[in-house]
Amino acid sequence: MSEQLKYKRVLLKFSGEALMGNQSFGIDSSVLGQVAQDVKTLIDMGVEVGIVVGGGNLFRGVALADSGIHRVTGDHMGMLATAMNGLAIQDALAKLDIDARVMSGFEIGVCDSFDFRKADAHLKQGGVCVFVAGTGSPFFTTDTAATLRGIEIGADVVLKATKVDGIYSDDPVKNPDAVRFDEVSYDEVIEKKLKVMDTTAFVMCQENQMPIRVFDMTQPDVLKRIVQGENEGTLVC
């Protein structure tokens, strides 16, 4: 089936909050299981999958800025939260007989340190790489980490999973007249000040011609349709 695929290697980015489901904290096992099943569907189709996950369901370093904890310390704590989520995803994928490897932006004893050559080899063998601890440095978001890892592993696209079905001209919750875009250019995103990713992540995508597709992760089989070339969400290219 791989010859029918539009994207053969993808970087899937989703927030830690996505793992909470309807909870206010932690990991919803049913959501975690669904994420693993969706990834397995891609693997069975012959797609190579890298994942970057945030840690906001467990900890947010920025939230400590006013509490006296140094921003760098807080960011490092947030990176550790992403590692916890990554290990949970690895375990969920292992239950589906998928060989997932957690690779960290800085050295953590419970997972491998990131190496793009090892990641590339693992993906080619049909395994999944879960990239955690962001870029390994403070002051960078997981959007930036997703962009960086996507470029490093030579992904065809960065797939940003959200709770809305694409990019709008305005907040669709607050403005019912907001218009959804099927496709926008990098320049249009800047000109119209559309909220796609943080500036560092977006500029990195633009400079390296890395397309971004923003989509609603709650829709059934949405990842399958995307890799087959269907027009889900919004494409930035």
Image (spheres, rainbow, N blue to C red):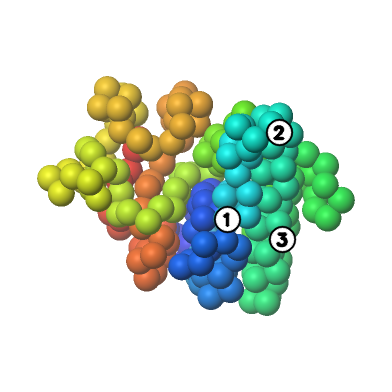
Of residue 150 and residue 2, the one placed in the foreground of this image is 150
Disc 2/disc 3 C-alpha distance (Å): 26 Å
Q: Tell me which label, 2 or 3, sits earlier in the chain.
A: 2
Q: Which residue is pictured at 70% across the width and 69% down the height?
A: 91
Q: Nearer the viewer, mark 2 or mark 1?
A: 2
Question: According to the image, label 2 marks what residue?
Answer: 69
> Could you tell me residue 26's position as x and y percent?
60, 63
Question: According to the image, label 1 marks what residue?
Answer: 57
Q: Nearer the viewer, mark 2 or mark 3?
A: 2
Q: Tell me which label, 2 or 1, sits earlier in the chain.
A: 1
Q: Looking at the image, is 133 positioned above or below residue 49? A: above
- Residue type at numbered disc 3: Leu
Q: Is residue 158 left or right of residue 142?
A: left
Image quadrant holding the C terminus, namely top left
Residue 94 in view in this figure: yes
- Residue type at numbered disc 2: Ile
> Could you tell me residue 16's position as x and y percent?
56, 54
Residue 226 in view in this figure: no
User: Where is residue 89, by image quadrant?
Assistant: bottom right
Kind of element beneath mark 3: helix
> Could you tell me residue 106's position as x and y percent?
78, 39
Disc 1/disc 3 C-alpha distance (Å): 14 Å
Kind of element beneath mark 2: loop
Categorize mark 2 by other alpha carbons within 10 Å: few (<14), some (14-19), many (20+).
some
Question: According to the image, label 3 marks what residue?
Answer: 87
Of residue 78 and residue 31, the one placed in the foreground of this image is 78
Q: Is residue 15 left or right of residue 236?
A: right
Categorize mark 1 by other alpha carbons within 10 Å: few (<14), some (14-19), many (20+).
many
> Could you tell me residue 128's position as x and y percent?
64, 59
Most extreme residue toward the left is 177
Q: Looking at the image, is 38 positioned above or below residue 159? A: below
